[in-house]
Amino acid sequence: MQFSHENGEIDVAIKDLVVAGWTGRDKAAVAHHIQELQDIGVAPPSQTPLFYRVSRTLLVQSDHIQVVGSGSSGEAEPLLLNHDGSLWLGLASDHTDREMEAMSVALSKQACPKVCANTLWLFADVADHLDTLILRSWVRDEGDWELYQDGTLKSILPLPTLMAKFPLDAGAGMLCGTLPAIGSIRSARFFRAELHDPVLGRSITLTYQTSELPKVA
């Protein structure tokens, strides 16, 4: 995969991919969310945070993905990549099949592509102000864009903490968890996300469209 950064471009060969779940920093809020999901039939995690291994081929750079049925949705997440001895920070969407989530969270993570932006920042350049980074997403069907997620990385576990719990080998990538949806988790035809650095005055963005493949039996 090819990414741009402030000094040029790099080609990254993704060898392993993991999706970190249940990464909220507020333990009471995480417990409340787990109970909400239990109430609709989603089994609680065996521990928090939890690291779901998924196929490396799921990480894509695309403005259009295909999913089965209408029950999936995106969520904005920081993306960490270990490439050639350096750690990089980017942006991705952990697009997830919500209907399958009720049967198995692990399988729901494997069911959909994970769209990532084609821009990276050196982790060292943001390490001293990670909690100030702003993560947002918007959704749209046929109307206007609606704000779907909005907060800072202070809401999720510190990224170094996640890497300490699940070290990233060379060529590995990690989606690092997300923020609560504004209103409710819902599907939309279009998804847009932004990771904004207010200290250095720059942003990473991604936008993609989802189309549905028919369910057949």
Image (cartoon, helix red, strand yellow):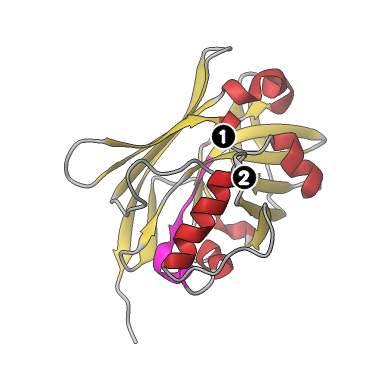
Residue type highlighted by circle 2:
Lys
Residue 59 is situated, as x and y percent measured from the top left of the image, at 56, 52
Q: In this view, does 37 lie above or below 207?
A: below
The residues bearing labels 1 and 2 have C-alpha atoms spaced at a distance of: 11 Å
Which residue is more in the foreground, 3 or 212? Answer: 212
Mark 1 surroundings within 10 Å by alpha-carbon count, few (fewer than 14), some (14 through 19), many (20 or more): some
- The quarter of the picture where residue 45 lies is bottom right
Which numbered circle lies on residue 6? none
Is 94 included in the stretch rendered in magenta? Answer: yes
Q: What element carries label 1?
A: helix
212 vs 206, left or right, is left
Which residue is more in the foreground, 49 or 142? Answer: 49
Which numbered circle lies on residue 155? 1
Residue 183 is situated, as x and y percent measured from the top left of the image, at 32, 44
Is 17 included in the stretch rendered in magenta? Answer: no
Q: Is residue 86 above or below residue 190?
A: above
Which residue is more in the foreground, 14 or 74? Answer: 74
Confirm whether residue 177 shows in the render. Answer: no
Query: Looking at the rendering, in which quadrant would you find the C terminus?
Result: bottom left
Which residue is more in the foreground, 32 or 199? Answer: 32
Residue 155 is situated, as x and y percent measured from the top left of the image, at 56, 34
Residue extending furthest toward the bottom: 217
- The quarter of the picture where residue 153 lies is top right
**Residue depicted at x 60% and y 51%:** 22
Of labels 1 and 2, the one closer to you: 2
Q: What stretch is highlighted in magenta?
A: 92-102
Mark 2 surroundings within 10 Å by alpha-carbon count, few (fewer than 14), some (14 through 19), many (20 or more): few
Which numbered circle lies on residue 27? 2
Residue type highlighted by circle 1:
Ser
**Residue depicted at x 59% and y 29%:** 154
Residue 28 is situated, as x and y percent measured from the top left of the image, at 57, 45
**Residue depicted at x 53% and y 58%:** 34
